[in-house]
């Protein structure tokens, strides 16, 4: 089995994850950042979460929801991941991996920089990405 595509995917997931978490750390006001809208995101809960995404949901709750909110709709501490900015064509899975592993400088929102996420593995981030992408699809983002 060729491990290169999996490694690329895992790194992408961790990067994006870190990028998202950076938004939780401080209230930055870098140029070009926008304020969060009053209603950041909505996710339809009409469909039951498929079994394949349940572990990702649990890991999201543990590592991401304090800043990114329940179902990734955002909070006062971090941006929504259920948002067009984070669709795969703009923030690929690799960006989540890099964000989780390295942290990310704020560049879309005024939440501040996202620190790297201690204790999260690339496999964890891969599962989190699956869950977030499912939420995005439910919201009609892609």
Image: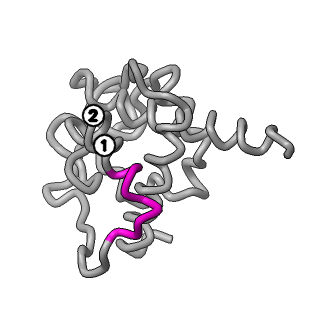
Residues rendered magenta in the picture: 49-57
Q: Is residue 67 magenta?
A: no
Residue placed farthest to the right in the image?
A: 2
| Image vertical order of residue 59 relative to residue 101, above or below | below
Q: Assign the magenta stretch its main secondary structure.
A: helix
- Residue occupying the point 49% across, 55% down: 130
Could you classify mark 1 by the number of other residues whose Cα lies within 10 Å: few (under 14), some (14-19), or many (20 or more)? few
Label 2–label 1 contact, CB within 8 A: yes
Residue 36, position as x, y percentages in the image: 23, 47
The image quarter containing residue 6 is top right
Where disc 1 sits, the SS reads loop
As drawn, is 65 to the left or to the right of 139? left
Which mark, by number, is residue 34? 1
The image quarter containing residue 132 is bottom left
Residue 125, position as x, y percentages in the image: 49, 39
Residue 21, position as x, y percentages in the image: 35, 31
As drawn, is 80 to the left or to the right of 141? left
Which mark, by number, is residue 126? none
Where disc 2 sits, the SS reads loop
- Separation of marks 2 and 1 at Cα, in angstroms: 6 Å
- Residue occupying the point 37% across, 57% down: 54
Taking depth in this image into account, of 84 and 103 the one nearest to the observer is 103
| Image vertical order of residue 66 relative to residue 132, above or below | above
What residue does disc 2 label? 110
The colouring scheme, among rainbow, by chain, secondary structure or one colour, is one colour
Mark count: 2
Residue 49, position as x, y percentages in the image: 34, 69
Q: Which comes before the other along the chain, label 2 or label 1?
A: 1
- Residue occupying the point 24% across, 21% down: 26
Q: Is residue 53 magenta?
A: yes
């Amino acid at each position: 089995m060729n491990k290169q595509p999996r490694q690329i995917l895992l790194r992408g997931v961790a990067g994006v994850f870190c990028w998202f978490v950076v938004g939780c750390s401080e209230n930055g006001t870098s140029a070009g950042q926008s304020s969060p809208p009053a209603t950041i995101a909505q996710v339809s809960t009409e469909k039951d979460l498929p079994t394949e995404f349940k572990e990702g949901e649990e890991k999201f709750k543990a590592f991401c929801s304090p800043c990114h909110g329940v179902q990734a709709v955002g909070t006062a501490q971090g941006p929504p991941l259920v948002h067009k900015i984070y669709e795969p064509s703009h923030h690929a899975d690799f960006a989540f991996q890099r964000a989780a592993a390295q942290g990310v400088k704020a560049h879309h929102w005024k939440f501040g920089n996202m620190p790297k996420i201690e204790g999260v593995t690339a496999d964890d981030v891969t599962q989190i990405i699956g869950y977030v992408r499912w939420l995005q699809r439910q919201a009609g983002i892609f």
